[in-house]
Amino acid sequence: MSPETQQARVEETAAKTLNVLFMYNGHTWDAYEILGLPAGAPLTAVTEAYQKMQKTMSPESREFMDTAYRVLQQELTRRSQGPLR
């Protein structure tokens, strides 16, 4: 494998780690995408986007949006605490 190919794989893997995926109704979803945010957005941006969406979301979609927000909140809190010792 060429050095360029190896570097491309490393960059691809790094980009994927920013996404936060969750299962809902048997499908895999990207929580950032659901809230309309770029992968890796900080918790403050996640909270702002969620609160903005709450004002317009239908009752049918509330559970789905709540799940996306909760998953992001938990993951970002875990990441901010650093690795376990």
Image: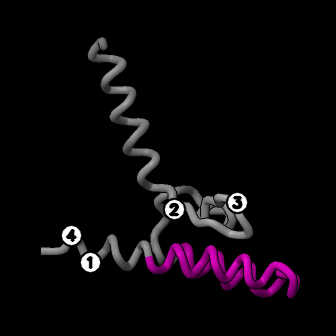
Q: Along the line of sight, which residue is nearer the eye, 13 or 42?
A: 13
Q: Which mark is residue 83?
A: 4
Specify which label sits upstream in the sequence, 3 or 2: 2
Label 4 near label 1: C-beta < 8 Å?
no
- Disc 3 packing (10 Å; few <14; some 14–19; many ≥20): few
Left or right: residue 26 compared with residue 10? right
Q: CA distance from mark 1 to mark 3?
A: 29 Å
Calculate the distance from the C-alpha at mark 1 to the C-alpha at mark 2. Answer: 17 Å
Counting residues from the start of the chain, the first of labels 3 and 4 encountered is: 3
The 10 Å Cα crowd at callout 4, few under 14, some 14 to 19, many 20 or more, is few
Point out the stretch of residues depicted in magenta.
45-74
Q: Can you give x and y, in whole percent of width and height, for residue 9 in the image?
A: 38, 30
Instruction: Give yes or no for residue 27 being in the magenta stretch.
Output: no
Q: Amino acid at mark 2?
A: Val
Is the residue under label 2 in contact with that under label 1 (CB below 8 Å)? no
What residue does disc 3 label?
27
Amino acid type at circle 4 is: Pro
Whole-angstrom CA distance, mark 3 to mark 2, is 14 Å
Q: Main secondary structure of the magenta part?
A: helix
Q: Quadrant of the C terminus?
A: bottom left
Q: Are marks 2 and 4 in contact (CB under 8 Å)?
A: no
Q: Residue flagged by tag 3: what amino acid is it?
A: His
Residue 81 has which mark? 1
